[in-house]
Image: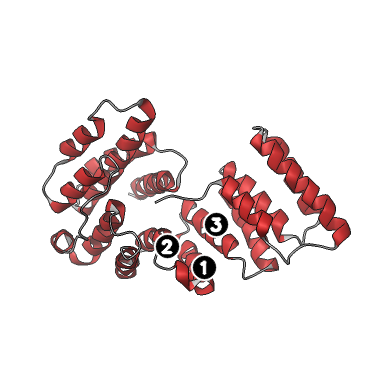
Amino acid sequence: MPVPSWRSLLAAVAILAGFAAPASAAESTEELLRAAAQAYRKGDADEALRLANRAVEADPRSVDCWLTLAALRDARREFDQAVDCYSRAIDLAPDTTLAWQRRGEDCFRLARFKESVADFDKVIRLAPERAPGHWQLGISLYYAGEFERGARQFELHRTVNPEDVENAVWHYLCVARTSGVAEAQQGLIPIHRDSRVPLMRIYAMYQGQATADDVLAAARAGDPGKNELRERLFYAHLYIGLYEEAHGRIDPARDEIALAEKYADHGYMGDVARVHQTLIARNAESK
């Protein structure tokens, strides 16, 4: 389930048309945005942010400026500020699908699930062809408690990504919330090949044909390198944790999600683990 990088967002910003300020302002802001991108590529995130802020100050009605500033806030994991920037872009150009998508992602990261769903729904209204591929919507629906609709979204995603174990697992989790784990297992989306290790062992666990220990053994098999092992263990612990939670085993689930967070990178699924861990902590504090 890949997520576009900050650089891909910057590239998308570069091709947006029709939102520029008058030519005298546009030239200076374009120079500032180019300089911000160059600073970021060189690893100077603070200078990139300073230049992007200058661009916004020079032309506060430029969608490009607000999207670039939002992307830099995302790169710094300053999601509240990024949401504000995407909102400014949306105010200026309500049909900017990119802004709705990215704001929905950041609302999810902030555990604002209903807002995330609303933004993703807007993306699909603007670009209906994106509906089948929108797995992020399915995950937001799960966390928003819209389990039946979430299940339908993962069934739709199957039409464009038929061999994705993660899609089958999230469908299982949605069905388990409404109809129980037995029905979820019975209705598990068929998967025959997912080359990512240990995804097929994870799938076997959700089928009831493998254990958590089998998943972890598969993750460690074959002497993977450090980075590969870290990624494998992330997926193993995340989906073991979600499986344990679906079966009502709360303490093991909590421990597994904590391990998933330990191994998580800054990709979207890593953020799913972090959000889930935040929810576990909140629930513990409320008791």
Q: Nearer the viewer, residue 272 or 1?
A: 1
Residue found at the far left of this picture: 209
Q: Which mark is residue 123?
A: 1
What kind of residue is marked 1? Val
Q: Nearer the viewer, residue 125 or 245?
A: 125
Q: Tell me where residue 147 sits by quadrant.
A: bottom left
What kind of residue is marked 3? Arg
| Position in image of residue 72 (x %, y %) | 63, 45
Asked which secondary structure carries label 2, the reply is loop
Above-or-below relation of 93 to 243: below
Q: Which mark is residue 134?
A: 2
Where is mark 3, residue-wise? 102
Asked which secondary structure carries label 3, the reply is helix
Q: Residue at x 41, y 46 (%)?
A: 278
User: Which one is earlier in the sequence, the residue at label 3 or at label 1?
Assistant: 3
Above-or-below relation of 250 to 115: above
